[in-house]
Image (tube, helix red, strand yellow):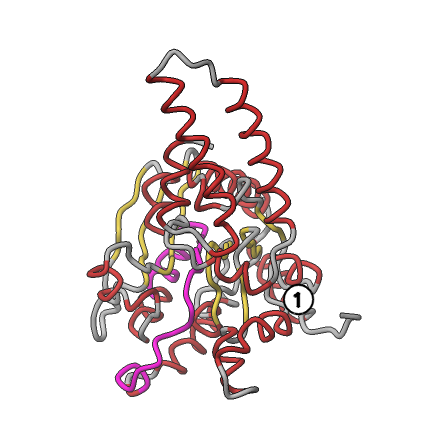
Amino acid sequence: MSNSSTKLAVQGGLAFERPLIDLQTKIDELRSLNTGSHLELQGEIELLEDRLKRQTAEVYAGLSPWERVNVARHADRPMTSDYVSMLLDDFVELHGDRVYGDDRAIITGLATMGEHRFLLVGHRKGKTVKDRLACNFGCAHPEGYRKALQKMKLAQKLRLPIISFINTPGAYPGIGAEERGQASAIARNIIEMFAIDVPIISIVIGEGGSGGALGIGVADRVGILENSYYSVISPEGCAAILWKSGEKAPEAAEALKLTSKDLHRLGLVDEIVPEPLGGAHRDQKAAIANVRVQLETWLTELKAIDPAELLELRYQKFRKMGVPIDL
């Protein structure tokens, strides 16, 4: 792991990562001694690095659903803004819903990635405290969903594919949002995305919470990063309803079948995008590079499909969801 990866882990370390962080700290200390003295410690450093890789692989292979939820929420996990800066060659942001205002919780814009041009739609959480408050921590208002749909219709006119990055705990639940038609805005997006006859790709890059995610999640191909989750409700919300206690969130996460492996087995996502060893927060560039490979594959594949056939396949894809299987 690089020194930058170490800083990421130490700054936002999760409880189950503490042994890994302690081991990485020891490696960094030995590196410092090896550089600043005549001691020959390279052999010991390499042994500890091998041990760290093995231990990291073991820890992440055995994560519980609740622990994966916490990885999906990691503060250093790449967000939509990171994908814009590291994935795209060019990006022109488009603002406003032409009705009420510009919701910062959803970003839309015309994007270029290599030979591909498309419309990007994504949840924006913000990085600083000020930005997070301005973005409502990624919880969009109805004007955000209206903005997203309006720009998607523009993409249809321009014959551009659409890529959406999902990363939200859910739509904003405030009174103002409800007064301005939150449920109606999300429902309209879901209905109308079935009629947009250009390729649509969605990737869950962090949290995929409830209707807030579905509002930009109807797509021909749905992908999910390895340690992301996609669920009808957050584990805390589920626990509060079923057990009247947020302490039951780990049990709720297990019951909701919200991990990438569960979702793929249930047919709710098409592909699991692998993350670097130890999670996307440890190596943002590698995680984003993996997403790029998947996006390029799907864009090339979907562009070859006739628009009328594309709509029929999208309809049939969602009609098949929910078929009972052995859990």
Which amino acid, mark 1? Gln
Task: Using the image, determine if residue 235 lies above or below residue 286.
Answer: below
Q: Residue 151: within the magenta? A: yes
Residue drawn at x 40%, y 18% as measured from the top left = 34
Left or right? Give the position of 2 relative to 199: left
Residue drawn at x 43%, y 26% as measured from the top left = 30
- Give the quadrant of the C terminus: bottom right
- How many numbered marks are there? 1
Which segment is the magenta one? 150-178
The reply to whether residue 202 is visible in this rendering is: no
Which of these two is toward me, 294 or 60?
A: 60
Examine the image and state in which quarter residue 125 appears. Answer: bottom left
Instruction: Report the residue marked by disc 1.
Output: 316
Number of other residues with Cα within 10 Å of mark 1, as a class: few under 14, some 14 to 19, many 20 or more? few
The reply to whether residue 121 is visible in this rendering is: yes
Examine the image and state in which quarter residue 108 appears. Answer: bottom left
Percent of width and height locating residue 154 = 35, 58
Which of these two is toward me, 62 or 304?
A: 62
Which of these two is toward me, 154 or 286?
A: 286
Which of these two is toward me, 117 or 241?
A: 241
Q: Secondary structure at mark 1?
A: helix
Percent of width and height locating residue 286 = 47, 36
Residue drawn at x 35%, y 48% as measured from the top left = 11
Percent of width and height locating residue 72 = 48, 57
Q: Residue 19: within the magenta? A: no
Task: Using the image, determine if residue 225 lies above or below residue 318.
Answer: above
